[in-house]
Amino acid sequence: MARTFFFGAYKYPRELNWVIGVVLLILTMTMSFTGYLLPFDQRSYWATIVGVNINGTGPLVGPYLSDFLMGGPDFNATTLSRFYAIHMLLVPGLIAALIGAHLYLVAKLGTTAPPWLKAEETDELKTEEK
């Protein structure tokens, strides 16, 4: 992603590919967040409590997101099953779909060269100019 950003490869016509890449990064972090609870020990319990409380401080949707993740007012088996479903079903499905879209766009639009490499004119372009 750093190479894409510094080379300016996120610009037209590849904006959607950049957005998909950023969403894939966020989904990867979501996988790690939801998977951290699954051992269900003290460390994962308290880390998830902290993470859900941090999500709850977000503007507008924060409290709703926190309530959704907890599955109610208390941290219990509903929370664990919800995190398991998100970790094993929802996020991997989204990741697979977005990887497919990302690869399709790369195949359709191609990749970009570093900015210090100049594109060479082909013979067809030279004959059209004359």
Image: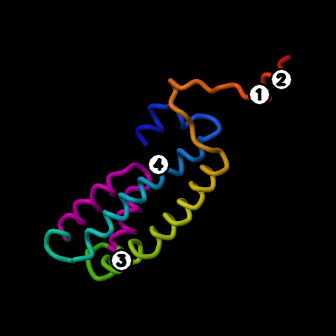
The magenta region covers: 45-72
Earlier in the chain: of badge 3 and badge 1, it is 3
Q: Position of residue 54 (x, y in %)?
A: 28, 55
For residue 108, above or below residue 88 = above
- Which secondary structure, mark 3? helix
Which quadrant of the figure contains the N terminus? top left
Q: Position of residue 53 (x, y in %)?
A: 27, 59
Q: Say which residue label 1 marks.
A: 123
For label 1, the crowd category at 10 Å Cα-Cα, with few meaning under 14, some 14 to 19 and many 20 or more, is few
Q: Position of residue 11 (x, y in %)?
A: 58, 34
Q: Say which residue label 4 marks.
A: 22
Which quadrant of the figure contains the C terminus? top right
The Cα atoms of the two marked residues, 4 and 2, are separated by 42 Å
Number of the front mark, 3 or 2 = 2
Q: Say which residue label 3 marks.
A: 84
Q: Are marks 1 and 2 in contact (CB under 8 Å)?
A: yes
Quadrant in which residue 100 is drawn: bottom right
Would residue 77 be counted in the magenta stretch? Answer: no
Numbered badge on residue 127: 2
Q: Residue at x 52, y 26 (%)?
A: 115
The Cα atoms of the two marked residues, 3 and 1, are separated by 58 Å
The amino acid pointed to by label 1 is Asp
- Which secondary structure, mark 1? helix
Would residue 70 be counted in the magenta stretch? Answer: yes
Q: Residue at x 63, y 35 (%)?
A: 12
Q: Are marks 4 and 2 in contact (CB under 8 Å)?
A: no
Q: Are marks 4 and 3 in contact (CB under 8 Å)?
A: no
Number of the front mark, 3 or 1 = 1
